[in-house]
Amino acid sequence: DTEVTQTPKHLVMGMTNKKSLKCEQHMGHRAMYWYKQKAKKPPELMFVYSYEKLSINESVPSRFSPECPNSSLLNLHLHALQPEDSALYLCASSPLGDVWPDTQYFGPGTRLTVL
Amino acid sequence: DAKTTQPPSMDCAEGRAANLPCNHSTISGNEYVYWYRQIHSQGPQYIIHGLKNNETNEMASLIITEDRKSSTLILPHATLRDTAVYYCIVRASIQGAQKLVFGQGTRLTINP
């Protein structure tokens, strides 16, 4: 398995809802990432997990809560979002360890719309 | 990480070679040049990376100038499916997970 999968593909939620985005990879990668991409803009990093521990948080608001239950799975829990949080949410993974340099591979993304 | 400069848009005829330039004049000796592309509404796709030497894989070739201040991504026989935004990214070769800093990229349109 050589890909990063993300579910759902599309999500519409209200500002009072709680939802979660899921990302999975079975390449044995030990780093996983969340990026956010607004329309017509480049992706921007939100969080990084290295060896299942949060290693980078780019000052993301607490209404976004990441979770890494195991080395293959990454979740992003969403609560009380605002319409301006509507974006494409991208997950990526990279090998770490002895692989050099460390290259990130992206999933197809979840298109989120907040009403 | 060093900043990169790319033209905002380029056109290329189908079947011809597409040459996408990237300027990274402040690159450091331990920084790699990476290229990704993003087809409309999909996730970025890794293409190729290099440090000093020219590199080639099944997707593209990467030519890095001797002073490493610029590089060119070459798609040898462009097809309509190569229409995408191409990002040139410079990142340090340090251990551990790092963020990729995407610039605005070049929007490449392949014309029939």
Image (cartoon, coloured by chain):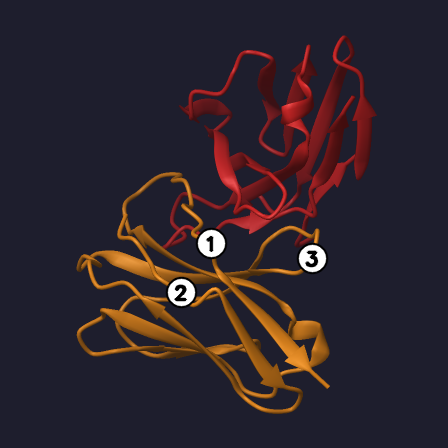
Q: Which chain is orange?
A: B
Amino acid type indicated by mark 1: Gln
The percent position of residue B45, horizontal first and vertical second, equals: 59, 58
**Considering the numbered disc 3 on the image, is that residue within a helix, a strand or a loop?**
loop
- Please give the chain letter of the residue carrying mark 3: B
Quadrant housing the C terminus of chain A: top right
| Residue A28 seen in the figure | yes
**At 59% across and 23% down in the image, what residue appears?**
A68
Determine which of the numbered discs, if any, sits on residue A14 in the image.
none
What's under tag 3, amino acid-wise?
His
- The residue to which callout 2 is attached is B6
Do the numbered discs 2 and 1 sit on residues whose CB atoms are within 8 Å?
yes
Q: Is residue A30 visible?
A: no
Asked if badge 3 and badge 1 are on a common chain, one would say yes
Decide: few, some or many residues near mark 2? Use Cα within 10 Å; few <14, some 14-19, many ≥20: some
Chain shaded red? A
How much space separates mark 3 and mark 1, taking CA atoms? Answer: 14 Å
For image coordinates 41% across by 40% down, the residue present is B99
Q: Is residue A10 above or below residue A1?
A: above
Picture layout, residue B28 above or below residue B107 = above
Q: Which residue bears the numbered disc 1?
A: B104
For marks 3 and 1, the one nearer the N-term is 3
Residue beneath label 3, please? B40
Q: Does residue A35 appear to the left or right of B66 in the view shown?
A: right
For image coordinates 42% across by 46% down, the residue present is: B100
**Residues at marks 2 and 3, CA–CA distance in whole angstroms:** 19 Å
- Up the image or down, A39 lies above or below B24; here it is above
Mark 2 or 1 closer to N-term?
2
